[in-house]
Image (cartoon, rainbow, N blue to C red):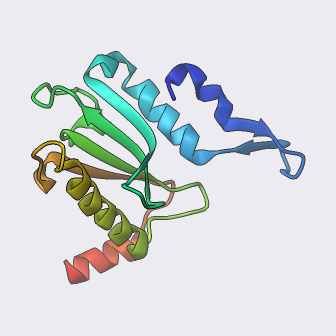
Amino acid sequence: MTHASCSSFITQSPAAKTGYHVNWHEAAICAIQIELRDYANLLHFMTEYVLGKNSYRIDLLVVHKVSGQQIPKNIARIFRTYNLFEVKGIHSSVTTAAYYKTIGYAGLFVDQISKQTQITAIDISITFLTFRYPRKLIKHLKEER
């Protein structure tokens, strides 16, 4: 999906009070692509990236083609070569389970991609996009990690 097709995340829905339904995953992914549009030649966006033969999916994988070149955008400050995004909708939050699931997906991704090229976990960043502050997760991480 490119930012030119980003209007598809809003659809009419007679069941919704406003008459519209928003697909928050697509909306967030489009926002990221629009934010980074000036650097599109350095990045490759892959939505719903499938891990192996499983049904496991990464919401968005952004590959930084030229990993040594910095991108002066807040969202790209932590970018590595491979950047995994987990998107939560407006009524969701990043739970402890979702956090560990995404860490697991990163491990599966390292295993999958390292068969093609030599990478380590240091080549990966994980970003959670959420509308809600994950209080329980932050508390867990402070106490356990």
Residue at the spot 37% in from the left edge and 54% down from the top edge: 51
- In the displayed structure, 31 sits above or below 129; it is above
* Residue projecting furthest to the right: 14
Residue at the spot 18% in from the left edge and 41% down from the top edge: 80
Query: Viewed as shown, does residue 81 lie left or right of 15?
Result: left
- In the displayed structure, 47 sits above or below 8; it is below
Answer with the quarter of the image where residue 121 lies.
bottom left
Residue at the spot 34% in from the left edge and 16% down from the top edge: 38
Res 79 seen here = no
Q: Picture coordinates of residue 52 (x, y %)?
A: 36, 55
| Camera-nearest residue between 76 and 113 | 113
| Camera-nearest residue between 13 and 65 | 65
Q: Picture coordinates of residue 131 (x, y %)?
A: 51, 54
Number of numbered markers: 0
Query: Viewed as shown, does residue 7 lie left or right of 18?
Result: left
Answer with the quarter of the image where residue 116 lies.
top left
Answer with the quarter of the image where residue 64 lies.
top left
Res 105 seen here = yes
Q: Picture coordinates of residue 126 (x, y %)?
A: 29, 53
Residue at the spot 24% in from the left edge and 62% down from the top edge: 107
* Residue projecting furthest to the bottom: 143
| Camera-nearest residue between 138 and 86 | 86
- In the displayed structure, 38 sits above or below 14; it is above
Quadrant containing the C terminus in the rendered view? bottom left
Query: Viewed as shown, does residue 129 lie left or right of 20?
Result: left
Q: Picture coordinates of residue 31 (x, y %)?
A: 49, 33
